[in-house]
Each structure stands twice: as structure tokens, then as C-alpha cells.
Image (tube, coloured by chain):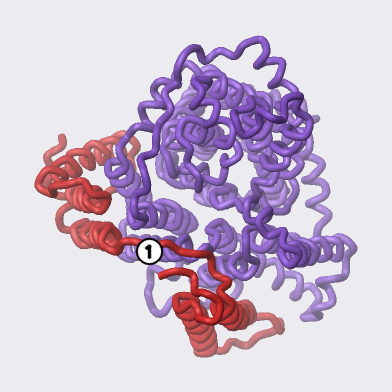
Amino acid sequence: MDTIGLLFHGLGLAMAPMNLLYALVGVTLGTAVGVLPGIGPALTVALLLPVTYRLDPTGSLIMFAGIYYGGMYGGSTTSILLNTPGESASIVTALEGNKMARKGRGGPALATAAIGSFVAGLIATLGLAFISPWMVKFALSLGPADYFALMVLAFVTVSAAFGDSALRGLTALFIGLALGLIGIDLQTGQARLSFGIPDLLDGIEVTTLAVALFAVGEALKVAATPPEGEEVVEPVKGSVWMTREDWARSWKPWLRGTAIGFPIGAMPAGGAEIGTFLSYSTEKALAKHPEEFGNGAIEGVAGPEAANNASAAGTLVPLLTLGLPTSATAAIMLAGFQQFGLQPGPLLFATNAPLVWSLIASLLVANFMLIVLNLPLVGLWVRLLAIPKPWLYAGILAFATLGCIGANPSPVELALLLAFGLLGYGLRRFGYPIAPVVVGLILGPLAEQQLRRALAISQGDPSILVHSPAAIILYLIAATALLLPLVLRLRGKGAVLKAMQADED
Amino acid sequence: MSGGAPGHPDRAGLVIAVLLAAVSVVIFVSTRSMPATAQYARVGPTTFPYAIAAGFALLAIGTAVSAFRGGFPEREPERLAPILWIVGGLVAQILALKPLGFSIATGLLFALTARGFGRGPLWITIPIGVVFSLFVWILFARVLQLSLPAGPLERLVP
């Protein structure tokens, strides 16, 4: 079957009443949790993973797709109505969106973000559908050595290329890699770094680590930071509808944002939020009224929001076709697949095509549901924003531990949650990025497997690692990604890179 | 505490460097004590751990240098008490989970976390937390079929 046939087949599956219900529950929960301040898409997905434990794989992944897209929408609502710096996923949206909300134009800001996300999600999901078969063909031609090179590239871009310090990025990555060592070695069955604790033999759960770093670490950080002034939730005054002028000023940024965001997300090179920054500066350069930027220019909301969503869909390309997570959110999605014994990658397209295509189709369905649901329900989301911090974080921690207990009701698991929570606090306190730890944990063991497979094929000759042109090119890109930021930093351009740091996704 | 001025090493940074070095040593020692197996391939289960231990050693040196150069970002002083409340909540939950069940244990976590954010008093927030957690338990254990430890309260739920 060709792509269109497969996609329609997937749509048929996704439109089954039960699956539509799963998608609806997913987008609603995803938006509701994503809207809460301080919760980005990665944590939304990690917190809601336990909800899907008892479903069948297809239903669970469909709900998951809804949660993912819903979390993205929810995040943009937060940054428009509540200027929350620190939520890196939509910092750029907050720049103009919050200004618009303060001027009483919160409605149109939310509308352009929602419709822009819809347009971008639609185009990018179709892009995902049409590019994936090609990527799968490419992926099948890669050997273990090439895969290892690909993972080295992902390590470098996730940890060292962005953020304000390569040293701290790499340290975070190595913490993740070290945690990935814990447990039974897959090839020899030997226990590594488990210190005689039976619970550690199965290794560290990605969801435990992610929830601890993002939820517990964040709660500790927020509680420990002395309060500085009240955060104001901007009320949504007047109509949420956009005027004719708003439409005229929005549609081009939506398309440009999509065109910028999707390729950046799709590259197996870190799902950093560069897309939103590039889109913002593009819109600023092209705007007819550049003086409005910084005071609530609608283009500055429309473009970056579209770029953000397009790059989120783009991240699914390497995840589904190569099994390569390039963001914290994607790493948790990968864990979601693994709970059903599914390993994303080219083989999944061959062995379980209906599942993959119904997942892609349900992303389209989720996208439609969100645009229908979100604008009318804005009042409800705003009320969620107003939950006082003590209750909010008490609830977040209750749900964080719930997921952990539901997966494995052992005191050791909860103790790990606490320990990683303190680690997360320390990382935040001293300016270390979080995402590389999560990516390192899940990608480290995969990289080790590929490396050892490659060396077993070559009977221990390490030159196999640089034997294929694909591997050499990947290493060259990785070296550039490691060295270029160093040069930029030495030339005093570090601030730009710091701004591009993506913590949550 | 603040990011040390040039000339004065950042003490927290030095502590981090020592911790990284300690991790390196732990991985190295733990890997060396692994029972040796007849290894056909030259790259066995110990190669990756040794590489990562070496990486940690290098990062420890880099971090120490960075601490001396004032390479850490500026930090504002932070409060310790809220952290202790929240950590106390998590510990209370671990201890209470088996004997008292999910709702009471998580209710304690809920109330102690709220206390960390300055909301009290505990004799009001603990009941609120327990009722909240009981609803969560009913939703997840009954409706979504997740296995969550039951205690005296949960057994009252039909």
C-alpha cells in the first residue's frame, strides 16, 4: 500500500468510536495538565503515562498522541496568560503573547496560537506521514556502526550544542549515561552498578527519572526560591475571535513557522527550541510594523507557536523511523512504547504497520479535536491557571508519586524518586540542563548495544566505526555541533546560545 | 551563596567537582569487581562503564577549573525550610504507604508539600490531602485498574 492508502487505513482505525474516545480523553487531560504553570509537555506526558497502563497498545498510544498534542496547546495558553519565564518550550510565545494579553488582546493571541498550532500540526503530521516511509528505507540501509554514529550525534546536539555551557550539558548527559548502566547487561546477563539491590537489576525507569527531575525537582526549586512579586493571570477580555486584520497578519507567519519548525524537529539532531527563535526573528525581520515587536505583535505569537508545534511533530520522525529520541518528551514517548514491548524504528513500520499508522492518523484527529475544544473552553483553562501554588504543587507531587507507585509499588522506587528529585533540584540550582539526563538514560543503553554489535561484527576491529560514508558524515556533523558553539562562546555570542537552551523538551 | 567572584573559587562548584570524581571512582571500582567472564569480543560489559568513569573524571577536572574561574551562573540565596518540608513529605509517604495505604500516605505528602509552600495548618491540610488522595485512589485503582496499595481507608470503599 502507498502512503495515502496506509494513512486512510490508519484514519479508519483511529475513527473507531472507542479510539475517538481515547483521543478525546487524551487531548482533554493533556491540555488540562499542560495548562498548569510549571508543567511542560515532557512532564505532562510523563505524569499521564500511568493513565494508559491498562489500555491495549493501540488505544494507549492514541491517547498518548492526544496527550502530547494537548500538552503543547496547554503550554501556549499558560505562556500567553501568565508570563512564566523558565518554561522554555514557549518562552518566545510569552514575549509577544503576554504583552497582547496585558493590552486586553488575550483572546486573539490565544486564537492565533491555537489556529497556528492547528495549521502547523496538520501540515507537519502530513509531512511526518509522507517522509516516514523514506526515512524507514534510509534507516534500513544503516548498520550498527551508523546507528552508533547517529546516537553520538544526538548526544552532542542534546547536551553540548545549546545552553550556556558545554561542560554542564555534557555533565548532565553523563549522569544520564551512568544511570543507564545500572541493571543487567543485555548481552551477558551480568549485573552492573546494582550494588546488590534487587530492585536495581531492572534498571532505572525513564518515567521515574523524568517525573522526579521535572516534577519533584521543579517543586523543590519553586518552593526554595523566595517569592518575588505575585504572578498575574491576565483575564481574557472581549472576544476570542480574531479580526480580519489579525487573520491577514497571521496566516503567513503560520506557514513560515511550520516551514521552519518541521525540518528542525525532524533532523536527528536535538529537538531544541531553535525553531521558535528562528521563526520569531524571521517574523521580526519581515514585519511591516517591526516597532510593534516587544509590545504585542500578533506575528510574534503566530509564527513561533506554529514552529513549536511543527517541530514537535517533526521530533516524531526520528523517534518513529529510527527509534531515536531527540528531546525529553520523545524519550518519555519511547518509554511509553517500551511498556508494551514495542521498539520504535524501521522494523516497527514493517511488523506493526497498522499501529504506527493509526498513531499518525490519531495525531491528525487529536489536532482537529483540539481546535474544536480549546477556544470554547478557554474560560475553564484560565480557571486552572488560578490554582494557588501550595495546592498545585501538592497535587503535582501526589500524581508524580502515583505514577511511580502504580508502575512499581516498592519503597526503593519511591526512594529513587526522592533521590532524583534532589538531583533535579541541584541541577536547576547550579544551571545544569535537565533534558540530557533523560535522553542519556534511554539512549545510552541503545548506543552501547549498537556499538557492541558493530564490534562483534568486525571481530573487535574499531575501524568499522568509521567504515561507511554515512557514519563519517554523522561524526563530522557531531564534531561541528560540539566545536561551533565553543567558538561562538569564545567570541562572546554565548548569550544567544543560552537563550536557545531547551530545558523541557 | 553566590557564584564566586574571580579569584575566589566557587565552593559549591568545587563540591560538585568532588562529587563527579566520586562517581567516577564508584563506577570504576564497581566495574572492576565484576566477575570476569570468558570474553570473546574485546568490547564486553565493562567497556562502556570504564569509558563513562573516565568521562566523569574529565568532567570533574573541568568543573574544578570552571569553579576557580567563576564559570558558574550567579545564584540567589535560597531557603532550606521548604525543601525539608517537601522531602519530609516524600519520606513520610514512603514510610506510611505499606501500613496505612495509598490515601493516608499520599495525604501526608500532600499536606507537607502545601506546608512547604506556606499553606497550613497541618490539622486542616492533612484531612484535605487524605480525601483528595482517596478520590484519586478510587479513580485510578477502581476505574483505571491500576494496582495501588490499599490500607484501612481504602477497604471501606465498596
Q: Nearer the viewer, residue A504 or A59?
A: A504
Residue B88 location (% of width, % of height): 23, 61
Q: Residues within 10 Å of mark 1 (few under 14, many from 20)?
A: few
Q: Position of residue B37 (x, y in %)?
A: 58, 87
Which image quarter: residue A244?
A: top right
- Can you see residue A417? yes
Q: Position of residue A342 (x, y in %)?
A: 58, 49
Which picture quadrant has residue A459?
bottom right
- Frontmost residue, B9 versus A420: B9
Chain under numbered label 1: B
Confirm whether residue A261 shows in the render.
Answer: no
The x, y position of residue A432, in whole percent, is 53, 63
- At horizontal 30% and vertical 60% (from top left) the residue drawn is B83
Q: Residue at x 50, y 12 (%)?
A: A239
| Residue ID at (73%, 41%) | A278
Judged from this view, the residue extending furthest toward the right is A469
Supply the letter of whichever chain is red.
B
Q: Secondary structure at mark 1?
A: loop
Q: How many marks?
A: 1
Q: Residue at x 65, y 69 (%)?
A: A448
Question: Is B44 placed above or below A341 here?
Answer: below
**Amino acid on which the number 1 mark rests in the picture:** Pro
Image quarter where the N terminus of chain A lies is: top right
- Farthest top residue? A244
The tint of chain A in the picture is: purple
- In the displayed structure, A156 sits above or below B128; it is below
Residue tagged by mark 1?
B77
